[in-house]
Image: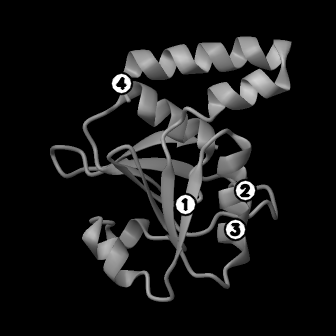
Amino acid sequence: MNRRTLVQLLSCAVVTTALSPMLASRALAAFPEVTVWRDPSCGCCEGWVKHMRGHGFRVRVVAAADLAPIKARHGIPDALQSCHTAAVDGYVLEGHVPAPAVIRLLTERPRAKGLAVPGMPLSSPGMDAGVDHYDVVLFGLSDGTTKVFESH
């Protein structure tokens, strides 16, 4: 999906939300599918899946008791790891990344591996258990560095 298509879909979603919930759900269904690898017994991971679906993403869940090989295959640095790993449209998502940050990532298409919310911040989507500050980190930049993509 290119940037122009995504912007058109977002515009359509905003307009149709005001007009008809049925039309809005059709527009939002055009987001690319997210594949998430998660431990089936993790409740906060299920909360994140619900958050993503609530923002219009189709989510395919893959149960995996051992996530270490998946994180290694996707090149997630140890310092950025969290409880689940996801992939969407050529990017990797690690942890409780908010859906609006994913939409921004897919719109701006930076040259990076993906986004991470390291650890399990209590106020991040799916955790919903407190009020604390956390950063969404853009990682895998061409020079090997990371940078803060958003702060919450």
Disc 3 crowd, CA 10 A, few/some/many (<14, 14-19, 20+) = some
Instruction: Choose the circle earlier in sequence order: 4 or 3.
Output: 4
- Identify which residue is drawn at 26% across, 51% down: 140
Residue that appears at 51% across and 41% down: 102
Mark 2 surroundings within 10 Å by alpha-carbon count, few (fewer than 14), some (14 through 19), many (20 or more): some
Residues at discs 1 and 3 in contact (Cβ within 8 Å): no
The residue labelled by disc 2 is 50
Q: What is the distance, in whole Å, between disc 2 and disc 3 at their CAs? A: 6 Å
Label number found at residue 42:
none
- Residue type, numbered disc 4: Asn
Alpha carbons under labels 4 and 2: distance apart:
25 Å
Which callout, 2 or 1, points to the residue nearer the camera?
A: 1
Q: Earlier in the sequence, mark 4 or mark 1?
A: 4
For mark 4, what is the residue?
2
Which kind of residue does numbered mark 3 sit on? Glu
The reply to whether the C-beta atoms of the residues labelled 2 and 3 are less than 8 Å apart is yes
The crowd level at tag 1 (other Cα within 10 Å; few <14, some 14-19, many 20+) is some
Judging depth in this view, the residue of 28 and 138 nearest the camera is 28
User: Given the image, on which type of amino acid does mark 2 rest?
Assistant: Lys
Q: Which residue is mark 1?
A: 60
**Element at badge 4?**
loop
Q: Position of residue 3 (x, y in %)?
A: 39, 21
The disc placed on residue 46 is: 3
- The quadrant the C terminus occupies is top right
Displayed quadrant of residue 67: bottom left
Q: Is residue 20 above or below residue 99?
A: above
